[in-house]
Structures are given as C-alpha cells and as structure tokens.
C-alpha cells in the first residue's frame, strides 16, 4: 500500500476517476505510514484522522455517482500549521486574520476541489514543547524551514500534496533539503486570507509535491482573485497544464554567475547545477550568464522588510520573546524590526524597486533564470545551534531575492551529494509566468528523474 503514497497526483487522478483506486484506501495508506513513521519524523502537529476518513468516504461516494470534481478529488493533502483550518487548533503564535473556526481561502479551495485534508504540519518557530520535524533522508539533518513538516511529509509519503508558505525561501528550502518540488508563485497569485502573517508584503502561499505536474494541478485550484485578500491579484488564471509538456527547445536560461560567486556554495552543489544546465542544453535550451547587480543587496533588504513587518505584527510579544520564550529566529526578527528605522525600511523598498527593474530587463532576454536553491545539502541539526540567528537571516542566499522581487520560483531536485542527501535547483520567471517555470522544470525533471528516489525510511 505504501506505493500508493508515492504515486503522483497526476497518475493517481485518472485511477480514482475510473474507480480503480478508492479515496478511502489511498487515505488509509497515508495514515498507515503516518502511524508507522511520524513518531520519529514529527511532520504532523495535528493529525485529523477521523475527519480525513469521513472526507475520503464522501469523495468515494461522489466519484461513484459520477460527480468527479477534478485531479485533486480524493487526494490526501496536508497544510502547514500557519493556515487556518476549521475545527483545528493552530500552534503558531501569530495573529491570524480569519475568524475562529473558519477555513482560510487556500484550504477552502482544496476542499472544493475534493481533496482530503489529513491535518496540519509542523513548521519552524512553534512554541516550546513542540519538537521540530526531521529530514526523512537522514534524521540527524534538518528538513529546511520554515515549512518543515510540509517538506518532510511529502518526501516520506505521509501525504501526496501539501501547502507551504514562502517569505524568504520557506517553501523552496525544505523542497531542496527533502528532494521534492516546491513552487513559490508570484506574490498575490494565491489568496492569503486566513494565513498567519509573517511579512505582509512578502508572504506567499504555494504548493509542495513530489513532482512538477502535481504542482500545476494544485496551483490550478489555488490561484485566483479573492476579495478578502486586498493583495490578491485579479489577473486571469492560466491553464497551468496546457503547455507543461511542450519542451524547452529554443528557450534561453540565464545563470547569475556573478551573484553565485558571493555565496560560499558547496562544490558538489555547484557541480549538480552544472550537470543540470548541461541536461537543459541537451534538450535544446540555450544557457547564458546574466548579471543582476541589486541581487547583492537583496537578502539584507528582504530581511529588513520581513523583520519590520513581523515586528509590527508581533510586537506585543516582544518582552516575552526576548525573555527566551520564543525560537531564536523569532527573537532575531523582532530584534531587527525593533532597532530598524523608517529610513531603513524605505531604503529596503527602494532596493526592491531597483531589483524588479533589473530583473525585468533580464527577462526580456531569457525565459527563466537558474541557480541553486541552497548553498549546501541539508545541514546537521547540531551544526546550526551555534550560528547567530541575525547573521543567518541577513547573509546572502539563493532564495530571498525572488521573494523581494515577488516573482515565481520553482525548486526541484537536481542531484545528490556524496552522503546521499538531495541537492536542489531553482527556476525563476517573470511575474505571473508560472506556466513557464513549470514547463522548464517539468522538462528537466523528466530528463533527470530524481523524483524516482525515495528516502530510506
């Protein structure tokens, strides 16, 4: 039965529609793995087993009656604790905009598509007493944050799709460390109503799955205008599967080599990227270097905006947090936000505008940019304990420039290191070009087929 949990949504959907597989059996297969593995993995903080089985039985009845809703109907999914879910307590200690007991828009859209909600997933920075999730490839290593359970749960076959949230790489980091696919869409592409906010002008809802085609199916359901989110875009929603298999022949892939030199990346990570780029060229794409000068300052600008907005949201908890009642990263954000000035915030916003202009110019010449997702594979949890949290937030990285610019960024696996840990790469596109980054990612994925590997759990 565990093989069902590692099937793609794309391959499972027609089997569910034809009633070759039951949503109940699929849900039970995921629940069996959760009971067998999650005691060590700790991906879930709230397993909603009874309601999930009820939803699976309802999906089965509807499909049997010919009322098939689409590719997510009967598919077991889970969501990061940061999302409001009706009847489920949130562990995250951040004010949430939706009323008590109300599904956030993203969860409501998953339910309307017929998905089965297994529960809420672990994330970085939850209050004391809640232990962090672990990496299914090696339990001594971190799964990447802050969507820790979302990445670990998909990689270990504990759900078939999940929702993460990306403010400074929090979808793409766990996707990279756990060897799965994750999409940070364009800012405003998916409603954030009912999402506990971290940084108002940066927070982005996005899906995480094993393969790229499943991201397209989830995005199709999640994207679209919501009047309850004032930042949600009214731009038309594309058909994200229409050109998914069109290939990359003639497309131009830009690589920001100058920026990459500023980051002390593991040679094995860079070697995996170069092999992936060579594979793209073998598929007919053209690879060229590009220069984006403002990327050098993007991580600091993103971190400052993030921290100022986080402090504005959570400053009532400042005294308690600084007394040691919060995670190290939460205290660091509050500290940076508290000591920053209005001028600092404005200068960071100016850097954001400059970065967007430069990227717009680059995307006149290339269809996507390619770069690593993280400088290293997943670190040992013990190796992170001594690092200064402020330094970790502000040092140059490969993820946060895309957040600052608000552009779509896709993370997919591109290799393994000598210790067998996954290595990830990203494709960035211009605003609302999710179809393009998914198309490029799918072409590479089908060539490299790293998604066929499974963790040793």
Image (tube, helix red, strand yellow):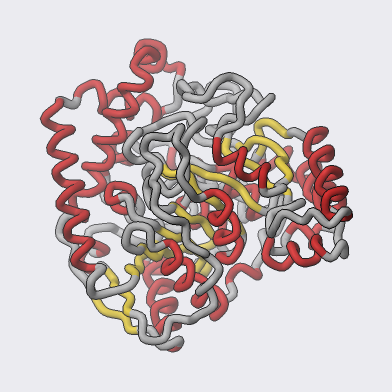
Could you say where residue 132 lies in the image, as x and y percent from the top left? 57, 35
When asked about the image quadrant of residue 58, the answer is: top right
Assign the C terminus to one quadrant of the image: bottom right
Q: Nearer the viewer, residue 334 or 324?
A: 334
Depicted 435 relative to depicted 281: above or below: above
The picture places residue 121, in percent across and down from the top left corner, at: 62, 38
Q: Is residue 32 visible?
A: no
The quarter of the displayed image where residue 371 is located: bottom left
x 81%, y 47%: residue: 59
- 421 or 166, which lies in front? 166
Question: Where, by quadrant of the figure, is residue 437 drawn?
Answer: bottom left
At 45% from the left and 82% from the top, the residue drawn is: 279
Whether residue 254 is visible to the viewer of this picture, yes or no, is: yes
Residue drawn at (54%, 60%), measured in percent from left and top? Answer: 181
Q: Position of residue 346 (x, y in %)?
A: 14, 34
In which quadrant of the rendered image does the N terminus lie? Answer: bottom right
- The number of callouts visible is 0
Residue toward you, 454 or 5 = 5
Q: Give the side of residue 172 with respect to residue 214, left or right.
A: left
- Where residue 327 sits: x, y (%)? 45, 26
Image point (37%, 47%), residue name = 187
Placement of 437 over or under 221, stated as above or below: below
């Amino acid at each position: 039965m565990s093989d069902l949990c590692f099937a793609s949504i794309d391959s499972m959907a027609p089997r569910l529609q034809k009633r070759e597989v039951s949503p109940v059996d699929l849900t039970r297969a995921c629940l069996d793995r959760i009971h067998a593995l999650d005691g060590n993995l700790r991906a879930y903080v709230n397993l909603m087993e009874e309601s999930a089985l009820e939803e699976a039985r309802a999906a089965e009845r509807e499909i049997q009656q010919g009322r098939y809703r689409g590719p997510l109907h009967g598919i077991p999914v889970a969501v990061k604790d940061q999302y409001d879910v009706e009847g489920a307590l949130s562990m995250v200690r951040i004010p949430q905009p939706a009323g008590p007991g109300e599904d956030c828009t993203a969860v409501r859209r998953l339910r309307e598509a017929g998905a089965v909600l297994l529960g809420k997933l672990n994330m970085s920075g939850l209050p004391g007493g809640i232990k962090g999730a672990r990496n299914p490839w090696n339990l001594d290593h971190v799964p990447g944050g802050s969507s820790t359970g979302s990445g670990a749960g998909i990689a270990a076959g504990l759900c078939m799709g999940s929702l993460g949230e990306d403010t400074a790489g929090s979808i793409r980091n766990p996707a990279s460390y756990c060897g799965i696919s994750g999409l940070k869409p364009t800012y405003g592409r998916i409603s954030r109503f009912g999402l506990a906010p971290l940084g108002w002008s940066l927070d982005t809802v996005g899906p995480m799955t094993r393969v790229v085609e499943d991201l397209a199916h989830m995005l199709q359901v999640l994207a679209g205008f919501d009047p309850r989110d004032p930042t949600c875009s009214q731009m038309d929603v594309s058909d994200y599967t229409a050109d998914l298999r069109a290939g990359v022949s003639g497309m131009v892939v830009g690589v920001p080599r100058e920026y990459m030199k500023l980051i002390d990346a593991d040679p094995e990570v860079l070697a995996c990227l170069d092999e992936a780029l060579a594979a793209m060229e073998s598929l007919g794409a053209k690879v060229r270097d590009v220069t984006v000068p403002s990327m050098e300052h993007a991580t600091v600008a993103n971190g400052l905006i993030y921290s100022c907005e986080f402090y504005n949201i959570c400053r009532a908890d400042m005294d308690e947090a600084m007394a040691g009642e919060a995670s190290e990263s939460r205290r660091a954000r509050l500290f940076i936000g508290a000591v920053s000035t209005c001028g600092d915030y404005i200068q960071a916003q100016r850097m954001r505008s400059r970065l967007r202009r430069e990227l717009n110019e680059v995307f006149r010449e290339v269809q996507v940019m390619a770069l690593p997702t993280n400088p290293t594979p997943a670190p040992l949890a013990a190796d992170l304990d001594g690092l200064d949290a402020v330094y970790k937030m502000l040092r140059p990285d490969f993820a946060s420039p895309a957040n600052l610019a608000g552009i779509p960024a896709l993370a997919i696996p591109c290799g393994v290191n000598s210790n067998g840990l996954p290595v990830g790469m990203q494709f960035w596109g211009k605003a609302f070009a999710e179809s393009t980054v998914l198309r490029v990612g799918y072409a590479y994925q089908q060539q490299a087929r790293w998604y066929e590997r499974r963790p040793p759990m």
